[in-house]
Image: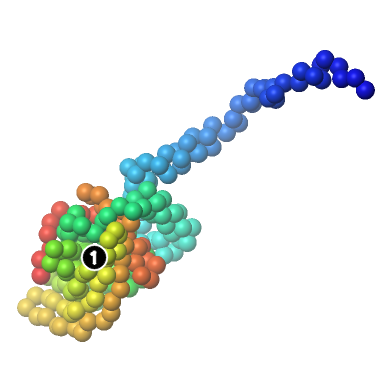
C-alpha cells in the first residue's frame, strides 16, 4: 500500500493546545509557596516559627497529632536545607531558650508546676563548646531553678555527645544535689544567629532561640 504525502510528513512533536485555566488559583499559589519553602531557608524558618507560635512550647501539640506531623515535616525541611553544615562550632555556644519541644519530661514539668505552688519560667540549654559543658535548665521564678550539668563532646558536622554529671534543685537559701542519670546525643540540624533546631537520640525535637541574656549558676 502506498503511503500518502500526509502520512510521510507527520510532525515530530505533537501539536500544542492551550491549557485550560487553573480552576483553583489558591492551589497554584499554595504549590508555589511550598516549593519556595523547600528551597529557601528563611521561608522554611519563618514557616516553622509560625507553626509553633501558638503551641505553648509543645503542650498543645501533645493533643494534636496532625499539628505535630506538620511541625516535624517543617523541621525535616529545614534539616534537608542544612544537611552537611557544621553546627558544632563556636556559634553553638550560648544560652538557648526553648520555644517548642516534643520531650515529654520537660512538658510534664511545664504543665504541672502549678501543683507545687509555682510556675515554669524559661527553659534553657546553656552550651559552652570551648569548655565542653552543657546545662539543661528549668527556671521557677522568682528564685527556683532545676538544672542538670553535663559534659559535651562535639562530633562534627552536627552531633554533640553528652553525659550527665550532676543535677541540682535550688531555691532561695537552699539547694538539693541529685545524682546524674544518663547520657546521649543531639544533632543541631539547623543553626543561625537567632534559632537552633535539634533532634536527639530518642527521636525528640527541640526548637530554641538565642536568649537575650546569659544564664549563670
The residue positioned farthest toward the front in the image shown: 2
Q: Which residue is drawn at 21% across and 69% down?
A: 152
Viewer-closest of 140 and 86 = 86
**If the image is split into quadrants, where does the N terminus sit?**
top right
Kindly tell me whether residue 174 is visible in this rendering: yes
Q: Tell me, what colour scheme is on the image?
A: rainbow
With 126 as the anchor, is 76 left or right in this view?
A: right
Q: Residue at x 41, y 54 (%)?
A: 76
Q: Nearer the viewer, residue 203 or 69?
A: 203
The total of numbered circles placed on residues is 1
Residue 32 sits above or below residue 127 on the image: above
- Give the residue drawn at x 21%, y 49%: 193
Residue 172: % across, % down: 9, 75
Q: Which of 114 and 34 is in front in this view?
A: 34
Q: Which residue is drawn at 28% across and 76% down?
A: 183
Label 1 packing within 10 angstroms: few (<14), some (14-19), many (20+) = some
- The residue sitting at the right extreme is 1
The location of residue 60, given as percent across then percent down, is: 39, 61
Up the image or down, 26 lies above or below 93; here it is: above
Outermost residue, left side: 173
Q: In this view, does 15 lie above or below 123?
A: above
Image position, residue 19 (x, y; %): 63, 25
Q: In which quarter of the image is residue 200?
A: bottom left
Q: Is residue 53 visible?
A: no
Quadrant containing the C terminus is bottom left
> Is 20 positioned to the left or the right of 71 in the image?
right
- Name the spot of residue 39 as percent of width and height, x first: 40, 42
Relative to 24, 95 lies left or right:
left
- SS under mark 1: strand
Tag 1 residue = 154
Amino acid at each position: 500500500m502506498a503511503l500518502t504525502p500526509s502520512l510521510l510528513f507527520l510532525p515530530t512533536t505533537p501539536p500544542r493546545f492551550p491549557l485550560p485555566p487553573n480552576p483553583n488559583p489558591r492551589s497554584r499559589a499554595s504549590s508555589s509557596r511550598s516549593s519556595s519553602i523547600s528551597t529557601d531557608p528563611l521561608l522554611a524558618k519563618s514557616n516553622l516559627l509560625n507553626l509553633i507560635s501558638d503551641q505553648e512550647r509543645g503542650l498543645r501539640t501533645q493533643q494534636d497529632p496532625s499539628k505535630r506531623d506538620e511541625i516535624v515535616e517543617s523541621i525535616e525541611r529545614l534539616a534537608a536545607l542544612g544537611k552537611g553544615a557544621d553546627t558544632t562550632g563556636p556559634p553553638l555556644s550560648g544560652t538557648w531558650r526553648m520555644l517548642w519541644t516534643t520531650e515529654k519530661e520537660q512538658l510534664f514539668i511545664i504543665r504541672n508546676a502549678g501543683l507545687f505552688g509555682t510556675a515554669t519560667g524559661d527553659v534553657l540549654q546553656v552550651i559552652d563548646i570551648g569548655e565542653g559543658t552543657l546545662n539543661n535548665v528549668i527556671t521557677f521564678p522568682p528564685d527556683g531553678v532545676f538544672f542538670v550539668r553535663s559534659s559535651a563532646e562535639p562530633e562534627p558536622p552536627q552531633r554533640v555527645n553528652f553525659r550527665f554529671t550532676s543535677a541540682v534543685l535550688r531555691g532561695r537559701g537552699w539547694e538539693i544535689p541529685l545524682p546524674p542519670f544518663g547520657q546521649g546525643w543531639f544533632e543541631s540540624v539547623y543553626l543561625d544567629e537567632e534559632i537552633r533546631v535539634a533532634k536527639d537520640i530518642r527521636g525528640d525535637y527541640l526548637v530554641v532561640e538565642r536568649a537575650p541574656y546569659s544564664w549563670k549558676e
